[in-house]
Image: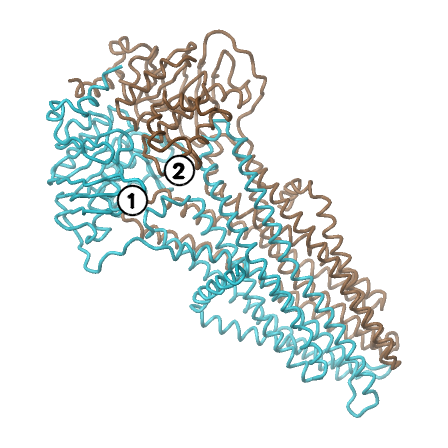
Amino acid sequence: MVINLKKLLVHIKQYRKESLLGPLFKLMEALFELFVPLVIASIIDNGISGGDRAHVIKMCLVLVVLGIIGLCFSITAQYFAAKASVGFSKNLRHELFKHIESLSYSEIDQVGTSTLITRMTSDINQIQTGVNLTLRLLLRSPFVVFGAMIMAFTINFKAALIFAVTIPVLSVVVFGIMLWCIPLYKKVQQKLDGVLGKTRENLTGVRVIRAFCKENEEIEEFENRNGLLCAAQKFVGRISALMNPVTYVIINLAIIVLIHTGALQVNSGEISQGDVVALYNYMSQILVELIKLANLIISLTKCVACGNRVQALFEIKSSLDVKGENPEVKGDTAVEFRGVSLRYKNAGDDSLTDMNFSVKRGETVGIIGGTGSGKSSLVNMIPRFYDATAGEVLVDGADVKSYTLEELRSKIGIVPQKAVLFRGTIRENMQWGKDDASDAEIMKAAMTAQAADVIESKGGLDFEIEQGGKNLSGGQRQRFTIARALVKNPEILILDDSASALDFATDAALRKAIRSMESNPTVFIVSQRTSSIQHADKIIVMDDGKIAAVGKHEELLKSCPVYNEIYSSQFKKEAV
Amino acid sequence: MAEKKSSGAQKGTMKKVLKYVGRHGFFMVLSIILAAVTVALTLYTPILIGDAIDLIVDRGNVDFDGIFKLLLKIGIIVGATALIQWLMNMINNRITYHIVRDIRNEAFRKIEILPLKYIDAHSSGEIVNRIISDADQFADGLLMGFTQLFTGVVTILGTLLFLISISWKITLVVVIITPLSLFIAKFIAGRTYRMFKLQSETRGEQTAFIDEMIGNQKVVQAFSHEDEALEKFDEINERLAKCSLDATFYSSLTNPSTRFVNGVVYAGVALSGALMCIATRGAVNPFTVGQLSCCLSYANQYTKPFNEISGVVTELQNALACAARLFELIEEEPQIPEPKDAEVIEDAKGNVSLDNVSFSYSSDRRLIENLSLSVKPGQRIAIVGPTGCGKTTIINLLMRFYDVNGGAIYVEGTDIRNITRDSLRSSYGMVLQETWLKSGTVRENIAMGKPEATDEEIVSAAKASHAHGFIKRLPNGYDTVIAEDGGNLSQGQKQLLCIARVMLCLPPMLILDEATSSIDTRTEVKIQEAFARLMKGRTSFIVAHRLSTIREADVILVMKDGHIIEQGNHEQLLERKGFYYRLYNSQFAV
């Protein structure tokens, strides 16, 4: 378990200097602290018994000087520790964000958004606290403990043996409790995922929840999950709370033995009374240190548990294996499917089976079929959102797997079903397709996407879109997502049922505008409406994950019963 | 000035925290008592040890019997201390986690009654951050506060008492020097509160960004926008690292500084103690080395809590900064409460009327103005018009997600503001274009509006909405767990489930906002037939683009820019050759 965490420590590399200097200065501080009992012993043995006031004063000044040196070292140590831990978590967040971005659709589907968010936020925060405390205290505490033991040996061998026995016992207890707690903290974080999930769900689904008057049930469910979280926290708290009392007992038992041994030794004249006080002081120092350590151990345990969760994310590798030769464009076939099948992870059945078709450059392809027949799955394979479980998908005559993802996706403009926009101005959103798109380019794309008048009504490209495009209507969002894909000037344009919120007039105008685009892209239109695709060069009719037929509108009307049925379901009533 | 303000805000937050703490009064008192006992026992032990040391004087001058008795006593006391300490820790745990649980619950309950205006205007990530991270940090700080503040204060008081019992002179030395460390701690804490607040705000901003980007990872990838997203992320991350470093470093200064003061105290005790030893040597009542050792040990114990308290104070700064953000959410103005005598409508027949309604989301842009409409039971009202004309807004108003700015909406002759929200909303069945499924099984999702539904009812609702076929093919049928955000279901399949949900509970009125936009038309026709059968004699509002859906409506409202520009049935509107006519014909135009 701890090994997993080690892997994370790679990200602290950049701060190696700080993470070494921090503990080092802390050690020096501790070193000076260890002199304190010696100074006191000197006060007692030389000062008091000799009645030497000057010696007492001198020694007390030494104590203050030790304190000042300790202060300087300690502040330096705190600075380095803070810098290293903050830098570490910064790097970690950066790497994790980057890693999540590299995951393919399959992994994202599987892992789920809430846990990704908790791991990026709550877990990394815990790690930061843990690392900071560790750098500040972890080396210091064992150092003080062992240092105290060594100092004890310089006083009296026999008495020091008590230290040598006590310390291993203490370590066993401390590490035992720690190992016990790590999996428990992991559970706490899992429960936290649940609470976060519920909260997110209630924010995104607020309309439906209120429409169904489910507020009270939702509250109940939240309180349930929250209660589970609380119970898990209390349970782990109960165990980690053992740390202090148990170590306290052990040390005090050691002190009892120590005094007993000390008494015997003094009686036989081997050591002095001052030595016993010094030995006792060292034992007390260990106690004080362990109390500090106990708090640290709790943070550290949390840190390890959270670290494991973060590392577990790093272990998920993208299932897409990218070669990146970027082959040259060959032939005039833009897209071809050869015996392609697709089965989603954990799905019972294939979503696509044995797909074979090819599309020439500049052609418009309509894809139609029943709900869940695999239309979206099909187009999602062209930009390689999912990899084929069998067969191959070719773009420009080469297997999609031979491109770098960036190269492949730069050819393709996709308008997803769900019209997602991001917080920022219209211009910023439009530049997603092309970083350096000029206003003129954006307006041209907007014109084609029938979004120009929307931009105008919003007062121009500087209009601020809220998260998720909440301040736009569904149709407006769709037009913007279409424009965003067009700004890219893609070779292949995929419209995945993305005109569903557009009225017919707009839809028709959109199709007309796309057909007259200068760049003449290959267009895939997924639609429910035959009117949207009936003029396509090629229509693929999907039925239950298979191709039912491929052809033109007129041919299909005659030859394909599925298509005929879809068509008549719309036109029987609508035809005037 | 700013300082004053922040400390005022802090006090306000502290007061609110104390209100929650007060609910656990019994355990609080118990915790304080246990803390006092623990401290007393912890402090008593050094006295006994000091006594024992005094019995070890010199070679051949050791009172073994006395030592043995003392050691036995020490053993018993230590055992008792440990037990009590554990109990106290558990109680503190309990109080803390219960408080945080309560605050989280309250925050969540607030979310359920916040007006939609608030939720629509705030990013979900930011709200989530408050309930998750802020509450977490608050818990950490609070727990530290409990475990250390009490014992700290009690230790300080206890030690002083014990010290006085040994030597009031040394006590005086201690009392004079130590306030210095509190002063330092307060000085640092005052400056770090703002840093912690900034840190927690920046964290909120980052979480919101993460929520947006990770939540829509698929779009990010489709546009190869990973690098830009990472760049923006790094910018926030960089800022966070900076203010985090400030907060962490400055707050961590407290500990070394107070420890230094403690060192000075220690030296002071050693000095005065040793001098007293020398001065009283040979006197009747000498100040012994054992007593000095005891005093030194007390000085350590006495100053340690100052250390801890100062540590706790900075930790509390962070906790309070986070709590303040939580309270901000909790204290947010809720939706207008229902009047006490709000009516419960049980069997709405479907009389809905809008009287001179006007509404806008923001005061600078007017949307709906002087909209009047009267709907009779059983009528099908279709709302058509170009995007952004306010169709969805009407639904927001009918469901009372938003309140009208002017005019009124009546259901069965009663202003909907005088009807309980629950009964108003359950009179409508609503299916939106934006499908939303809760994480849970297919069965749970369908049964959302009627949890007591039998399996047969659920299956027949699924059959009516033509969802049964694909549900059967899912790996676990009706018990398949739908992943977050709908997972691998297609948009159309999600819509089918949403329709099944409404089919099951069959409310007297229906709102369909592009409810079938992602469903293929064959299925749609069948679903509409099912709806027509089920909704016979019930009022329905339909927003749609497919004219097949609209044609059969009793009244078609043609909307443009927030106004109803045409109104009538299909034939009447075609005859008028107006906006609708053009719209209708456009679908055959190429």
Visual hue assigned to chain A: brown
Relative depth, front residue between B385 and B156: B385
Q: Amino acid at mark 1?
A: Met
Q: Quadrant of the N terminus of chain A?
A: top right
Tell me the residue that label 1 is attached to: B448
The secondary element bearing badge 1 is classed as helix
Visual hue assigned to chain B: cyan
Q: Amino acid at mark 2?
A: Asp
Mark seen at residue B485 = 2
Q: CA distance from mark 2 to mark 1?
A: 16 Å
The secondary element bearing badge 2 is classed as helix
User: Horizontally, is A91 left or right of A223 in the view?
Assistant: right
Relative depth, front residue between B364 and A203: B364
From the image, state whether disc 2 or disc 1 is nearer to you: 2
How is the model colour-coded?
A: by chain
Residue A121 location in percent, x, y?
52, 46
